[in-house]
Image (spheres, grey):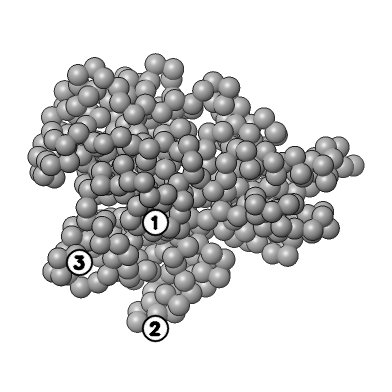
Amino acid sequence: MSSVDTTIQLIRTGQADGATCAPELADGPWIFDSSPLPSYGPGASMGDVIPTGSPRQGQLPTEYQRASNDELHVRIRAAKATLGDRAVILGHFYQRDEVVQHADFLGDSFQLARAAQTAPNAEAIIFCGVHFMAETADILARDDQAVILPNLAAGCSMADMADIDSVTACWEQLEALYGTEPDAEGRVPVIPVTYMNSSAALKGFCGDHGGIVCTSSNAATVLEWAFQRGQRVLFFPDQHLGRNTAKAMGVPVELMPMWNPRKPLGGNTADDLDASKVILWHGFCSVHKRFTVDQIDRARAEFPGVRVIVHPECPMPVVDAADEYGSTDYIQKAVAAATEPSTFAIGTEINMVNRLAAEYPQHRIFCLDDVVCPCSTMYRIHPGYLAWVLEALVRGEVLNQITVPQDVAVPARIALERMLAARP
Ligand code: SF4
């Protein structure tokens, strides 16, 4: 199976059936680097606004823009060979194949941040993912290691939906409402829980306020931890992961009000907040929001017996209609564990789904959404940027370093350590 990049090129030139959400995906991401557009450029999150103050990428030198993919691959391999184990390249599951082929490790954000720790000689960690992932790698890295994000504009629109100022303002309103005194069982009024897909500042906020980080693999364990210590949870930024996880644990949906940061009390009444068990931040992933119950119905009609597996960032009706749901790690393991040839309809980012299809040709594996629409922020990493940062490293220059200040990194590490210590 060809890569998503190749498929988009073929669709654009009329040589392949199918549709893409944005034909501009076939262009180089550098076209959007200096764009005054307030959004992320083409792809699933193209309508999401980049917050003011988010890092923007300067123009990629033209020699990298003009180089063919073949030339870039040769240059990347040469730079990698020169650097040897002084540099480690990490590739996220949602990253394009053209970049992933150069990665030393492939995984989800937390697996990758930890994988970097297993490369003791690496002076540079090149994170082919998005901004919050590079921040987490920096929090966990040694002081003498530089974490590099090849394109600074590779943010995450979901992570950007909760910023430290809005969360702090929400917290102050909740404290004014609930006070800070624990109940008779010693549980404080509210525990903040942030999804890994959030800025370092929010992880630090959780560290400072008795809270914790979760991933999509351990969200239930983390919520259990939080309910032992708090009467309720403030969950950010992904409403869907919070709702799907808490619902599966038996929390009624009516006790999960949504917090809209633009409204007083998040758009809720004091009574609703008082009765709540989980307060959900008004955030979502634009990639996973594309999946629908209709798509599941169509897959079942066309392929009776199909196994539908979706990611918990999908909306609740989609998760409810699927056969199974779980993190990228869960999806990967579910496919790997299937002993008989099977049909899988998968609701997660298309680069990962296509890679699974190529890796397990004995199965029929397809993306629930038949429109080719990758994550627009992952799209910002292209072999041109990888070649650029690697060749700079060979010359002794560190470009695009992501550094989390110590006053944020220390409490963020506390929140991450609580997560690692939480047990089912
Ligand atoms: S897939 Fe969604 S959550 Fe993941 S990086 Fe892209 S926008 Fe962010």
Q: Is residue 374 left or right of residue 388?
A: right
How far apart in space, not on screen, are marks 2 and 3 (Cα)? 26 Å
Residue 18 position within the rendered picture, expressed as x and y whole percent measured from the top left: 25, 72
CB of mark 1 within 8 Å of CB of mark 3? Answer: no
- Furthest-right residue in this view: 184
Look at the numbered disc 1 and give the secondary structure of its residue.
loop
Give the residue type at disc 2.
Ala
Bin the neighbour count of mark 1 within 10 Å (Cα to Cα): few under 14, some 14-19, many 20 and up.
Answer: some
Bin the neighbour count of mark 3 within 10 Å (Cα to Cα): few under 14, some 14-19, many 20 and up.
Answer: some
How far apart in space, not on screen, are marks 2 and 1 (Cα)? 31 Å
Q: Which residue is mark 1?
A: 46
Q: Which residue is mark 3?
A: 11
Q: Nearer the viewer, residue 19 or 358?
A: 19
Give the mark nearest the N terminus, 2 or 3: 3
Q: Examine the rendered structure and indicate whether residue 191 appears above or below residue 288.
A: above
Look at the numbered disc 2 and give the secondary structure of its residue.
helix
Q: Which residue is mark 2?
A: 301
Q: Nearer the viewer, residue 90 or 131?
A: 131
Residue 165 position within the rendered picture, expressed as x and y whole percent measured from the top left: 62, 38
Q: Nearer the viewer, residue 322 or 285?
A: 285
Give the residue type at disc 3.
Ile
How far apart in space, not on screen, are marks 1 and 3 (Cα)? 19 Å
Give the residue type at disc 1.
Met
Give the mark nearest the N terminus, 2 or 1: 1
Look at the numbered disc 3 and give the secondary structure of its residue.
helix
